[in-house]
Amino acid sequence: MPIPNRFSCAPTILVIALMALNAPTAQAQAAPAGDQAPETTAKSAKSLSFTDPQDGKFDASDYLLNHKGALPVPTLITEPAVGYGGGLGLVFFSESMKDAAEKAQSTGKGPAPPNITAVGGAYTANGTWGAGAAHFHTWDGDRYRYLGAIAKVDAQLDYYGLLNQARAYALEGLMLVQQFMVRLGDSRWYVGPRYVLFDSKATFKGQVATELGGFERDQRIGKGGLVVDYDSRDNIFYPSRGSYAELEAQFARGGFGSTQAFNMYNARGFTWLPLARTWILGLRADGRFSTGDIPFYAQPFVDLRGVSKGRYQDRNALATEMELRWEMTPRWSLLGFTGAGKAYGKWHSFSDAATVYSVGGGFRYLIARKLGLSIGIDVAHSKDQNAFYVQVGSAWH
């Protein structure tokens, strides 16, 4: 899996932390009308129930809302680019999600996520591994958000390039991420700087991608830039309505510690539209663009379910996806999706570049009703490839 353009390329544990950071907001939005707030009396871990009193079904809301301290989080990896594997993380909450929500209500500043520290690692069948740590912190009722992460990765990957032929290479390095976001007034907009440093070593293990010329094995990416986020989703885990958008401009220069000079511009957006009481249409668009002397492994790639990450990679990449969800019961939902993408700009012009299509389906089970958190599996197919994914909430994050 090539190093993505966003900081989510750190190990799985960083994604876990990001998924958790808005949990109190999700709690407030996910609870149906008539639900009461969680009990104010603290519960011991032994007394926490895994049965929802509302419908008698298995439910982890009580545990997740009241849990404090270290939370073990196992992860199953099914990404075709690196093979099957697994990971284990420990997520440390400064306070329970319930306590964070109650504190926000008492201060009148709106729901704010708890501070989170996460550590963990992952390993896959082809020898790819990664380990890292991340910390997320908020101030002033979630007006200011900080995210920091450090990770070590050693990935066994394939590069296709001009010949559209897999050439195996190893990519190892140390990554550092720093981000600080500020809410604009009382709006749904956040803006702030993001810095990414990746000190890397790339080595082809067999046939070399000669179209790259005499590339440097040891490279350092140092990128600084600006990020703008908008979020009106009714639930960050598994939305039923609302939108999310992110715009990012990053510049790799010697002043940021980079051995290469290049620019990256990314734009992505998701929206969920209720068509009827139990039918929800999701739409996604993703554009990634680069200019300058960008390392081959950092080039944008088509990101779709059913398509191996890095399989379609060039200076620019576009992807669009549509998903239709049927909530057949309050707990269970079925979904079908299809998407298309294209990578172009260096090896192929836009008109000559191949368009890749994917199609698939999946299901979700609402495992934490008060948080709106669902888990399930997606199965997807693209040209000459099948894949399945264990999903926590929506596939779009």
Image (spheres, rainbow, N blue to C red):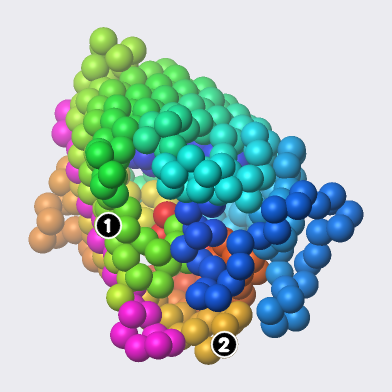
What amino acid does circle 1 point to?
A: Gly
Location of residue 180 (image quadrant): top left
Location of residue 4 (image quadrant): top left
**Residue 110: percent from the left, percent from the top?**
43, 47
For the residue pair 143 and 320, the one nearer the viewer reads as 143
- At a point 37% along the width and 35% down the height, the residue shown is 143
* Mark 1 → mark 2, Cα distance in angstroms: 28 Å
User: Which image quadrant: the C terminus?
Assistant: bottom left
For the residue pair 213 and 147, the one nearer the viewer reads as 147
Task: Name the outermost residue toward the right.
Answer: 46
Q: Is residue 66 visible?
A: yes
Report if residue 104 lies within the magenta region: no
Q: Helix, strand, or loop for circle 2?
A: loop
Query: Residue tagged by mark 1?
Result: 269
- At a point 26% along the width and 12% down the height, the residue shown is 254
Left or right: where 45 falls relative to 283: right
- At a point 19% along the width and 58% down the height, the residue shown is 353
Q: Which residues are magenta?
A: 274-292
**Residue 258: percent from the left, percent from the top?**
31, 16
Our reading of the magenta stretch's main secondary structure is strand
139 w.r.t. 222: above or below? below
